[in-house]
Structures are given as C-alpha cells and as structure tokens.
Amino acid sequence: MRLLDRRTRALLGASRLGFSVAASATLLLFYNLQFWRDSLQALGGAAAGSVSFLVALGAILITLHALILHTLPGRRTAPVVAAAL
C-alpha cells in the first residue's frame, strides 16, 4: 500500500460515509454557532417547539451536507472540498 493511500485512509477513516457525516456535523454544529443562536432567538426562545424545529433543521442540514460530500468522485476529493467549506 502506498504512503499516499495510507494517509487518505487515515483521513477518511473506515468509510467515506462516516467521514461525510462527521465532517458535516462538525461544520454545522461547531462553525455555525451564530446561526443557531440567531435562529433560536428568532423562534422566540427555548420553547419545546422551537428546539424540536431546530433539531429537525440540523438533521436535514447534516444529511444534505453529507450527501453532497459523499457523492463527490474519488477518495481525495471529499476532504479537499470539506476543507474548503
């Protein structure tokens, strides 16, 4: 196994799907904190309906981001695109 293949496998983990979901969740939850704060404030605080709406919105956004990353061709393209985001 070539060194570059080992690095790619270490970066992606066991599966591309796992990498896609992990990268999407990281981008969405940790790099968009201001978006979540503003959304919670716009919905009127931490009521049960507001929180459940934000959880559903987060699940949809993580799924869409992961789908985009997972459908990219090649093993090295997804990490490059995830780093660019």
Image (spheres, grey):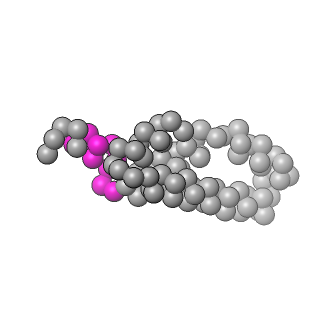
At 83% from the left and 53% from the top, the residue drawn is 43
- Asked whether the viewer can see residue 56, the reply is yes
- Left or right for 1, reference 82: left
Where residue 62 appears, x then y in whole percent? 57, 55
Q: Is residue 11 positioned above or below 19 on the image?
A: above
Camera-nearest residue between 27 and 71:
71
- Asked whether the viewer can see residue 18, the reply is no
At 70% from the left and 38% from the top, the residue drawn is 34
Q: Residue furthest left?
A: 1
At 47% from the left and 41% from the top, the residue drawn is 81
| Span of residues in magenta | 6-15
Q: Quadrant of the N terminus?
A: top left
- Left or right for 59, reference 46: left
At 52% from the left and 45% from the top, the residue drawn is 26
Question: Predominant secondary structure in magenta?
Answer: helix
For residue 7: magenta?
yes
Where residue 78 appears, x then y in whole percent? 42, 46
Q: Quadrant of the C terminus?
A: top right
Q: Residue furthest front?
A: 73
Where residue 37 appears, x then y in whole percent? 74, 43
- Left or right for 53, reference 79: right
Camera-nearest residue between 68 and 42:
68
